[in-house]
Amino acid sequence: MGTAVYGNSLILLSSISYAISSVITKKGLGSIKPLQMLGFSTLIGFIALSITSILEEPLDIINNLSTETWVVLLLLTLFPSFIAILLWYEALANAEISRLIVFVYLMPVFAVIFSYILLGEIISIQTMVFAALIISGVALAQKDTLRL
């Protein structure tokens, strides 16, 4: 299997998983508050990733992480992830999935912007064209809700 086919298959699997996760979350938010849902999903994710890490990674890697690394991991876990997921759950609780899911396509656009700001990466003309296409597609999908 070629690298492109493998990579594209993983992206497709990721998209399908994200869609399934959104449907399950939306259903759960009918009876559970978003903050409780976030706590529950974080706990399940923590357990699953911990078991996987213990089975797949040498334990000396974890033991040798510096205090600074642990602080960075904690801050990245608590603030950007926590706030973003909590806002996503709040939106899911109050809107249709079909209206919200298209905003997921903006993730690579924000990744490019933040890589430019934080890492000083160069944004090519091709990247700008594709970002404009993504933004246009999201706007087009939301055109009925964007009318002023």
Image (cartoon, grey):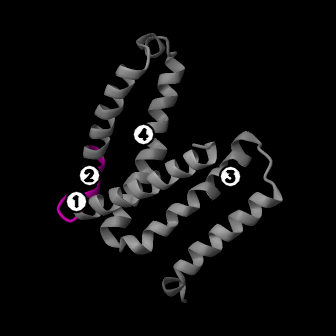
**Residue at label 2?**
37
The percent coordinates of residue 97 (x first, y second) are 37, 70
**Residue at label 3?**
112
Q: Nearer the viewer, mark 2 or mark 3?
A: 3
Q: What element carries label 2?
A: helix
**Crowd rating for badge 3 (residues with CA inside 10 Å; few <14, some 14–19, many 20+):** some
**Residue at label 4?**
78
**Residue at label 1?**
28
Q: Is mark 4 on a helix, strand or loop?
A: helix
Spatial CA span between label 1 and label 4 = 22 Å
Spatial CA span between label 1 and label 2 = 8 Å
Q: In which quarter of the image is the C terminus?
A: bottom right
Rendered residue at 68%/52% (across/down): 112
Q: In which quarter of the image is residue 54?
A: top left
Q: Disc 1 marks which amino acid?
A: Gly
The percent coordinates of residue 2 (x first, y second) are 61, 44
First in residue order: circle 2 vs circle 3? 2
Give left or right: position of 7 versus 44.
right
First in residue order: circle 1 vs circle 4? 1
Spatial CA span between label 4 and label 2 = 15 Å
Rendered residue at 45%/67% (across/down): 101
Contact? badges 1 and 2 (CB < 8 Å): yes
Q: Nearer the viewer, residue 44 or 86?
A: 44
First in residue order: circle 1 vs circle 3? 1
Q: Disc 2 marks which amino acid?
A: Met
Rendered residue at 46%/51% (across/down): 14
Q: Disc 3 marks which amino acid?
A: Val
- Which span is picked out in magenta? 29-39
